[in-house]
Image (cartoon, rainbow, N blue to C red):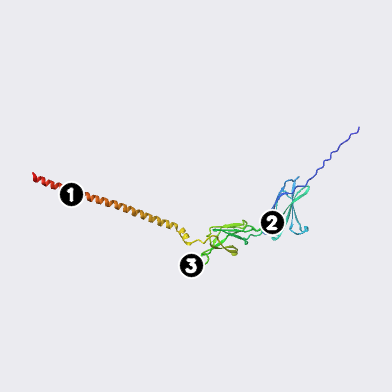
Amino acid sequence: MIILHSYFICVFVFVAPGPPASLRFESPTETSLILHWTPPHEINGKLRGYVVQYQQDGESHGNLVKFEMISDQVNHFELNDLDPSSYYIFKVIALTAAGQGPYIEGRVATLLEGVPPSNITVVSSNTSFNLSWVPGDRHRNHGFHIHYLRWKSGKELEKGLGSAAGVRWERSELINSTQGFYSLTGLQPGTKYSLMILHDNNSHWQQDFRTMGPEPSEMPGRFATQGWLIGLISAILLLILILLILCLIKRSRGGKYAVKDKEKKEIDFDLQNKDETFGEYRSLER
């Protein structure tokens, strides 16, 4: 009797992990970058760590820099002393016992310090200027103000109200350089304005523009600004007129009553005289 023994051989196949799920960048300074990534969706075993590779864009493969991090808890990496004028190509690879998986890749450069825009398009309306510009791709957000100056009109100059320019520069609210648009409102129609942007206490951009529409006349503006005074004077005049009318009515009624009283007294006096006369005649007859 022959007994056959069957041998079962178990073969364990190790599969490499998938690529990291995401890759993003942060630029603290003009010469540094921080890479952030997330673990692969398909780990296929126990994650050992990651490999980070990078090189300047356009350089040969021989300049590739490689870092290996043996820790599955690490999900970021910081690089310093980078060239602010160059772009870099980064690759992040996950590691398991089976080796390296496919990489995730990104091309990025450090962010430059932001500056106010200088290539600005301005569209005028009756009471506003609409300013638009294209933000820099690599520039950080920079806060700035629009300084504007109203020029005196011809009528104001004829009356000696100051010099050719306005009294003082006004300033807009703080504007974000990355928003690409701003509307400067509350202006006068048909009026010339100077617009200026300052950077490091120097004029970064300056141009003159005019709002649309006819130049406003001085009288309506003066009456509009003194409307409260006109209303007060009108109310006082109306009150005086009402008091005069009441006085005239009262005086008229008082005169009528005085004439009637006088006439009544004269009639009573005549009747009294007649009664006394009749009384004398009667006494003589007796």
Question: Total number of numbered labels?
Answer: 3
Distance from Cα at disc 2 to Cα at disc 3: 62 Å
Question: Relative to 9, is 209 above or below?
Answer: below
State the residue at coordinates (15%, 48%): 274
Residue depth check, mark 3 versus mark 1: number of the one nearer the observer = 1
In this view, the residue farthest toward the right is 1
Q: State which tag comes first along the sequence, 2 or 3.
A: 2
List the residue tagged with mark 2. Answer: 33
- x and y percent of residue 271 in the render? 17, 47
Q: State which tag comes first along the sequence, 1 or 2.
A: 2
State the residue at coordinates (16%, 47%): 272
How many residues crowd around disc 2 within 10 Å: few (fewer than 14), some, or many (20 or more)?
A: many
Dividing the picture into quarters, in which one does residue 143 lie? bottom right
Q: Tell me the number on the disc at residue 158.
A: 3
- x and y percent of residue 123 in the render? 59, 59
List the residue tagged with mark 1. Answer: 270
Q: Hey, what amino acid is under mark 3?
A: Glu
Distance from Cα at disc 3 to Cα at disc 1: 82 Å
Dividing the picture into quarters, in which one does residue 26 lie? bottom right
Q: Mark 1: which secondary structure?
A: helix
The N terminus lies in which quarter of the figure? top right
The C terminus lies in which quarter of the figure? top left
Residue depth check, mark 1 versus mark 2: number of the one nearer the observer = 1
Q: Hey, what amino acid is under mark 1?
A: Asp
- x and y percent of residue 107 in the render? 71, 55
Q: Hey, what amino acid is under mark 2?
A: Leu
Distance from Cα at disc 1 to Cα at disc 2: 125 Å
